[in-house]
Image: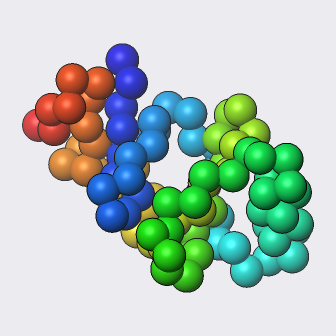
Amino acid sequence: MARFVNIGFGNLVNADKIVAVVSPDAAPIKRMVQSAKEEGRIVDATQGRRTKGVLITEDTYVILSALQPDTIGRRFQSDKNILDEKGDMDE
């Protein structure tokens, strides 16, 4: 069953497909983001705000978020921020 986590501004990701949540400040992450942009593997979920978190998926897609990695990590751990595939909140 797919579980979705809110990564800010109503954007949801499949929690089971995320490999890492990292800060965009390190040079290797900046190179990874640039490479993903060039190859069309980027999903920008920042709603025009500054990128503060980068999510890496199993399928090598890169998702940009305006939320800090710590905030996103807490949302992955908390059941109240996870939606099941029917759109219902876990209890």
Left of 18 or right of it: where is 87? left
Count of marks, rendered view: 0
Above-or-below relation of 15 to 30? above
Q: Would you say residue 65 is visible in this rendering?
A: yes
Of 91 and 32, the residue lying toward us: 32
* Percent of width and height locating residue 19: 64, 42
Q: By what rule are the colours in the image chosen? A: rainbow
The residue lying at 25 percent from left, 37 percent from top is 83
* Percent of width and height locating residue 18: 57, 41
| Residue 50 quadrant | bottom right
Query: What quarter of the picture does the C terminus occupy?
Result: top left
* Percent of width and height locating residue 78: 28, 51
The residue lying at 16 percent from left, 38 percent from top is 89
The residue lying at 38 percent from left, 46 percent from top is 12
| Residue 87 quadrant | top left
Query: What quarter of the picture does the N terminus occupy?
Result: top left
Of 91 and 33, the residue lying toward us: 33
The residue lying at 41 percent from left, 58 percent from top is 7
Left of 36 or right of it: where is 72? left
* Percent of width and height locating residue 85: 29, 24
Left of 76 or right of it: where is 22? right
